Image (tube, helix red, strand yellow):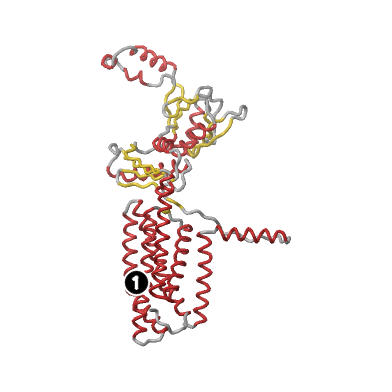
């Protein structure tokens, strides 16, 4: 490869490294841009220099605080062949609920009959737990025939004050358990397309606006057509919310729920209706909460360990390998900037395990450089020229670097596919780090050494 081509490649590498470094940590660059823009403005220039986007790192709950919840699903009433679908449906409903709660990037995983929910950065965990387990059931009920109402009320009076043993001896005693005024209809929350907060046009009172899907719209129109002049009651979780009188048949599939709502309670009801009902009952069996202070301490300690380890590696490379060690250190700095930029762009959720995987991959990147330099030394001691030693050093080191990194990547992919969320964080950063590490060792360090034309042995 000609020197001109090598220099062009190096320029491209430094341009990429510049963008990666400023994407990883744009604070000082953006401050400089602000200063230049103020000078341009004072000179009456209309255009402004752009900033680098300040994309935050995604931190796991062990670094920013949060909760790790484990639920157990009751599948006793579900057939064996339908259990997998029930758990998938459960996961989807829980995901919708925590997303509506405003949690940033929640993690919801299924493991056999257990559901793992990770809520990073959550402040009100008790409210989140309540919302996850809540199962709002929306239904519409029409008026009973007056004769039936009278029979049920009479049956209720008949069983009053009696023991359960006495009640069970009464004929048709189950009738007393029914709603005396309204009877359930086909129209339930399963036909709901969306629910949202609204306000009464006559009074500024909040209400919940409902919109049904196509099938639900037909059912609603049929229901209102046969109940003109009668009450149509709206129930949530078996509790009557309102019972408006139907004035005329309603087409279009839109309705509203009125009641003694505040804006917050109306929003919450709409949110829960949109999330849907749980397909199977769940029970919270484990809860681990990491406070934001503890997460901050863990992050600071991890960063301190990473920085100290990084500096120790740079010092080792420079002391033992001189000029090639300096090039390897520059490559390592570029490697770190690439990795951090990728973590932001993908994005990767960083956990303590993930940081450990990143630091381990950094060590493997250094190991690749050491293998290359060791082979180069052998070639130089054999009397080869500097450029030939570079070629042979990389050629002889490549099989060991390739095999070591590929086996590590393979193990990382297996861990990512079958491990828990904590193991997946470690595996993902390890795989990304190894891929970028091979690139920097073989491509960047190689071109740095080629650009150094003096025939000097790395001692």
Residue 396, position in %: x, y?
Answer: 34, 78
Question: Pointer 1: what residue?
Answer: 401
Tell me what residue is drawn at x 37 percent, y 81 percent: 392
Q: Is residue 70 left or right of residue 51?
A: left
Tell me what residue is drawn at x 46 percent, y 76 percent: 448
**Placement of the C terminus among the 4 image quadrants:** bottom left
Frontmost residue, 95 versus 383: 383
> Dot 1, how many residues are within 10 Å of its Cα: few (below 14), some (14-19), or many (20+)?
many
Frontmost residue, 245 versus 156: 156
Q: Quadrant of residue 360?
A: bottom left
Residue 196, position in %: x, y?
Answer: 53, 36
Tell me what residue is drawn at x 38 percent, y 21 percent: 178
In the image, is residue 342 above or below residue 199? below
Q: Quadrant of residue 414?
A: bottom left
Tell me the SS state at disc 1. helix
In the image, is residue 362 above or below residue 326? above
In the image, is residue 57 above or below residue 330? above
């Amino acid at each position: 490869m000609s020197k001109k081509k090598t220099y062009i490649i190096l320029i491209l590498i430094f341009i990429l490294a510049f963008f990666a470094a400023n994407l990883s940590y744009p604070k000082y660059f953006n401050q400089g841009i602000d200063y230049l823009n103020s000078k341009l403005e004072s000179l009456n220039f209309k255009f402004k220099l752009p900033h680098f986007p300040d994309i935050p790192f995604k931190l796991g709950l062990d670094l920013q605080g949060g909760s790790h919840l484990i639920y157990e699903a009751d599948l006793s009433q579900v057939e064996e062949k339908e259990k997998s679908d029930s758990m998938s449906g459960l996961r989807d409903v829980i995901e919708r609920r925590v997303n509506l709660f405003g949690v940033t990037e929640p993690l919801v995983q299924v493991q056999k009959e257990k559901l793992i929910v990770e809520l990073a950065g959550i402040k009100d965990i008790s409210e989140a737990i309540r919302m996850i387990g809540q199962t709002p059931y929306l239904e519409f009920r029409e008026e009973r025939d007056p004769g039936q109402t009278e029979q049920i009320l009479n049956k209720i009076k008949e069983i009053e004050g009696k023991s359960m043993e006495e009640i069970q001896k009464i004929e048709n005693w189950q009738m007393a358990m029914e709603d005396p005024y309204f009877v359930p209809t086909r129209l339930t929350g399963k036909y709901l397309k969306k629910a949202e907060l609204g306000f009464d046009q006559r009074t500024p009172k909040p209400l919940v606006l409902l919109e049904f899907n196509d099938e639900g719209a037909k059912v609603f129109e049929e229901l209102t057509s046969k109940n003109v002049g009668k009450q149509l009651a709206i129930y949530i979780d078996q509790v009557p919310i309102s019972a408006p009188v139907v004035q005329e048949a309603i087409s279009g599939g839109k309705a509203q729920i009125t009641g003694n709502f505040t804006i917050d309670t109306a929003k919450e009801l709409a949110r829960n209706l949109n999330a849907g009902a749980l397909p199977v009952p769940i029970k919270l069996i484990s809860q681990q909460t990491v406070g934001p202070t503890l997460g901050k301490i863990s992050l600071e300690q991890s960063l301190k360990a990473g920085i100290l380890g990084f500096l120790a590696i740079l010092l080792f490379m420079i002391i033992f390998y001189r000029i090639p060690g300096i090039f390897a250190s520059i490559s390592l700095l570029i490697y770190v900037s690439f990795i951090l930029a990728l973590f932001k762009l993908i994005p990767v959720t960083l956990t303590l395990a993930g940081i450990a995987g990143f630091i381990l991959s950094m060590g493997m990147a250094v190991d690749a450089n050491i293998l290359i330099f060791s082979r180069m030394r052998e070639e130089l001691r054999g009397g080869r020229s500097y450029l030939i030693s570079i070629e042979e050093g990389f050629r002889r080191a490549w099989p060991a670097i390739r095999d070591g990194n590929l086996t590590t990547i393979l193990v990382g992919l297996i861990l990512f596919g079958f491990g828990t969320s904590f193991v997946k964080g470690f595996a993902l950063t390890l795989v990304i780090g190894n891929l970028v590490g091979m690139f920097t060792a073989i491509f960047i360090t190689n071109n740095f050494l080629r650009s150094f034309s003096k025939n000097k042995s790395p001692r």
